[in-house]
Image (cartoon, rainbow, N blue to C red):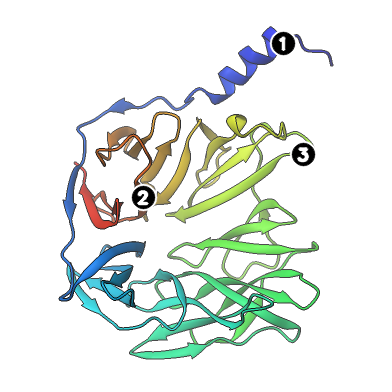
Amino acid sequence: MLTTMATAVLASTALLAPVTAAEAGAPCVRENLSFPAGSWQRIDMTAAEPSGRFQLALGTDTSFGSHTIRWDNGVPTDLGTPPGSFTDINQQGDIIGSIETDSERYYYTAYRYSGGRVTRLPGLPDTVSSSARAIAPDGTIAGSAISAAGKHTAVVWAPDNTIHALPGSGTTSDTDDIDTDGTVIGEIDDHPVRWSPGATAPDPLPAYNAGPNAGWDLTAIGGGVIAGTENPGTGNDSDTRMLVWAPGAAPVPYGAATPLAVSATGDIAYRRPYENELWLRHDGVDHALPFGPSPYPVATVVGINPTHTVYGNNFSTPVRWRCS
């Protein structure tokens, strides 16, 4: 079908407009989190579990040493040198990440830190590298196992550390996040899917306006609500839009925005990159997350608790935003 340039511009503008209009509520109030004892160059929060009890950060001291820092109900503890990179923390305070095993071939092994002990997680029979992406309250871990041929397979590790490949055909699959009930989100052959606990097949997520070369990135799931992005296949980053999939509903576009986190109650934190703004949407109301001052995107969001408190960073300082 032939489309004039004017029609194409109007269609693109309509697609990128925030379809789900929301009223603006009071801005959230930003507070710095307390630091553990020591001399610090920077502390970068990397994860916050859904209940709001635990948060996780990488601290760099003035001698350039790395430290794992964990907050428990607002009290920070320096857990010492991390065994590797870390990606998530759950409501038990367990931490997951990956340990480098071969620097030349970029091989890693997923691990779990629990009760002061680091456990390297097993792979599939052909696994040479693995990564842990997210951990549920019961200790189930979503991640990926990579074969020597480079094939990625979406996997979960049970609380007893046994590994299970997630079902579904395809040449490659990966995970992105896990909900509190164990639902995993990710991709099979670059198409977004959801794996329900115990399911024998993945549930494909519907597209919004996808062409043959469309691409998706899933960010987070909370309370069954999934947030991610879709590019319709134009190859133009400015056409990428944020999508939200609520349980049993078609995806809803948020326009030119990037999702950052979803709470267990379905609150969504997102960035408007062209305006350099952070927002929290809950109960149909948008609340600004102030940061800076800077004309650059110096703030990040890593998690949201059930009472609309948002956790992240402002510059290199861990913060929380309290939202009404």
Residue 163, picture quadrant = bottom right
- The vertical placement of 218 against 45, above or below, is above
Give the residue drawn at x 23%, y 55%.
Answer: 319
Between 256 and 178, which is closer to the camera in this rendering? Answer: 256
Q: Residues within 10 Å of mark 1 (few under 14, many from 20)?
A: few
Give the residue drawn at x 19%, y 41%.
Answer: 324
The residue under label 3 is 213
The residue under label 1 is 5
Q: Position of residue 250 (x, y in %)?
A: 58, 37
Check the picture and name the quadrant holding the N terminus.
top right
Three-letter residue code for mark 3: Asn
As helix, strand or loop, the secondary structure at mark 3 comes to: loop
Three-letter residue code for mark 1: Met
Judged from this view, the residue extending furthest toward the front is: 63
Left or right placement of residue 82 versus residue 14 in this view: left
Q: Nearer the viewer, mark 3 or mark 2?
A: 2
Q: Position of residue 291 (x, y in %)?
A: 26, 41
Contact between marks 3 and 1 (CB within 8 A): the answer is no
Q: Residues within 10 Å of mark 3 (few under 14, many from 20)?
A: few
- Measure how far apart labels 2 and 1 are at the Cα level: 37 Å
Q: Residues within 10 Å of mark 2 (few under 14, many from 20)?
A: many
- The vertical placement of 110 against 293, above or below, is below
- Measure how far apart labels 3 and 1 are at the Cα level: 20 Å
Three-letter residue code for mark 2: Thr
Q: Position of residue 96 (x, y in %)?
A: 45, 76
Give the residue drawn at x 83%, y 13%.
Answer: 2
Give the residue drawn at x 57%, y 38%.
Answer: 251
As helix, strand or loop, the secondary structure at mark 2 comes to: strand
Q: Position of residue 55 (x, y in %)?
A: 29, 67
Q: Earlier in the sequence, mark 3 or mark 2?
A: 3
The residue under label 2 is 300
Residue 15, picture quadrant = top right
